[in-house]
């Protein structure tokens, strides 16, 4: 009975020793091994054996990229504006030994380091610059924090400022300022539109006046040309009639007298003051009158000859 109990005890001790010696490291993690509290080696993902009761696992480091939420904090800008900001930081452990033994509580150290640099970077900017240069802020934070975490074996891959929130009274003032700026731009654009419209109308009227004057000038030129040609034709006709009269042609005299007679009748008919005009009722009477006048002219010219 006692022998059986000894065998069971030995088997139990052997099982505990074997269980203590076997170490399985999951994918994405590295374990450090310490012998009597001193670092000796690093276990990578897979099955490993260590010396029971001599070696022990020291730190279990997550080698995957991790996300660190930075708590919201109040920051005062260089122009004394108070804002509340928070951020998120992405980092990855590259050296598990440094991350295990160069810093105590890596996540808490990262949290404080990011918050300190956020206050430093944002505090050097004015509020407007802070709100409009989010990418530049992220770049500056990444450069500073990655440099500071290099001795810890940590690589900071990204830092993003999630929100920059000014106080409500400052937000209201910014909204009123934005509204005033938009109204100002609207008034300016409307005035510029009216000015452009007035210029276009004036240019149109100018072009219309020029075209109208050119048209009147052209019409006057053509009218003068027509009058000149008519005067020339009338002078030529008068010259021919004069030569015919000079040669004693009675038909020319009749033509001349009849033309003048008809011109006179036309002028009488066109006069506004003429109420009543006495003229022959038929053509024979008019021709008779013309013939009579022609006879008078013939006698007159004949007496002269």
Image: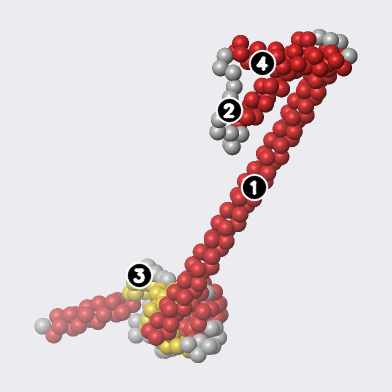
Q: Is residue 64 left or right of residue 15?
A: right
Q: Quadrant of residue 28?
A: bottom left
Counting residues from the N terminus, which is met first, the one under dot 2 or under dot 3? 3
Q: Nearer the viewer, mark 1 or mark 3?
A: 1
Q: Is mark 4 in CB contact (under 8 Å) with mark 1?
A: no
Mark 4 packing: few (<14 Cα in 10 Å), some, or many (20+)? some
Q: Secondary structure at mark 2?
A: loop
Question: What residue is disc 1 on?
Answer: 209
Q: Residue at x 49, y 67 (%)?
A: 186
Which residue is nearer to you in this view: 43 or 141?
141
Counting residues from the N terminus, which is met first, the one under dot 4 or under dot 1? 1
Counting residues from the N terminus, which is met first, the one under dot 1 or under dot 3? 3
Q: Secondary structure at mark 4?
A: helix
Q: Does 111 appear above or below 206?
A: below
Q: Secondary structure at mark 1?
A: helix
Question: What residue is disc 2 on?
Answer: 277
Which residue is nearer to you in this view: 25 or 227?
227
Question: What residue is disc 3 on?
Answer: 26
Q: Nearer the viewer, mark 2 or mark 3?
A: 2
Q: Nearer the viewer, mark 4 or mark 1?
A: 4
Mark 1 packing: few (<14 Cα in 10 Å), some, or many (20+)? few
């Amino acid at each position: 009975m006692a022998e059986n109990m000894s065998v069971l005890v030995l088997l139990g001790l052997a099982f505990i020793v074997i269980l203590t010696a076997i170490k399985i490291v999951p994918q994405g993690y590295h374990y450090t091994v310490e012998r009597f509290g001193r670092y000796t080696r690093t276990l990578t993902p897979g099955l490993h054996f260590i010396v029971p009761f001599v070696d022990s696992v020291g730190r279990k480091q997550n080698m995957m990229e991790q996300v660190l939420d930075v708590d919201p904090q109040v920051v005062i800008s260089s122009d004394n504006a108070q804002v509340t900001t928070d951020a998120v930081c992405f980092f990855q452990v590259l050296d598990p030994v440094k991350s295990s033994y160069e810093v105590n509580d890596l996540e808490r150290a990262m949290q404080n380091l990011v918050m300190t640099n956020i206050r430093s970077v944002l505090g050097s900017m004015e509020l407007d610059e802070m709100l409009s240069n989010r990418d530049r802020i992220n770049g500056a934070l990444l450069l500073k924090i990655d440099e500071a975490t290099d001795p810890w074996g940590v690589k900071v891959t990204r830092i993003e400022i999630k929100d920059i929130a000014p106080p409500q009274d400052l937000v209201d003032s910014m909204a009123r300022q934005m509204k005033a700026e938009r109204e100002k731009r609207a008034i300016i654009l409307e005035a510029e539109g009216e000015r452009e419209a007035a210029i276009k109308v004036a240019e149109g009227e100018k072009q219309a006046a020029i075209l109208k004057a050119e048209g009147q000038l052209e019409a006057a030129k053509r009218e003068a040309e027509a009058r000149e040609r008519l005067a020339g034709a009338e002078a030529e006709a008068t010259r021919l009639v004069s030569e015919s009269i000079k040669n004693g042609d009675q038909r020319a005299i009749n033509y001349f007298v009849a033309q003048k007679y008809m011109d006179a009748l036309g002028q009488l008919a066109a006069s506004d003051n003429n109420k009543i005009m006495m003229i022959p009722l038929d053509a024979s009477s008019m021709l008779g009158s013309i013939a009579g006048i022609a006879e008078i002219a013939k006698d007159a010219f004949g007496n002269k000859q």
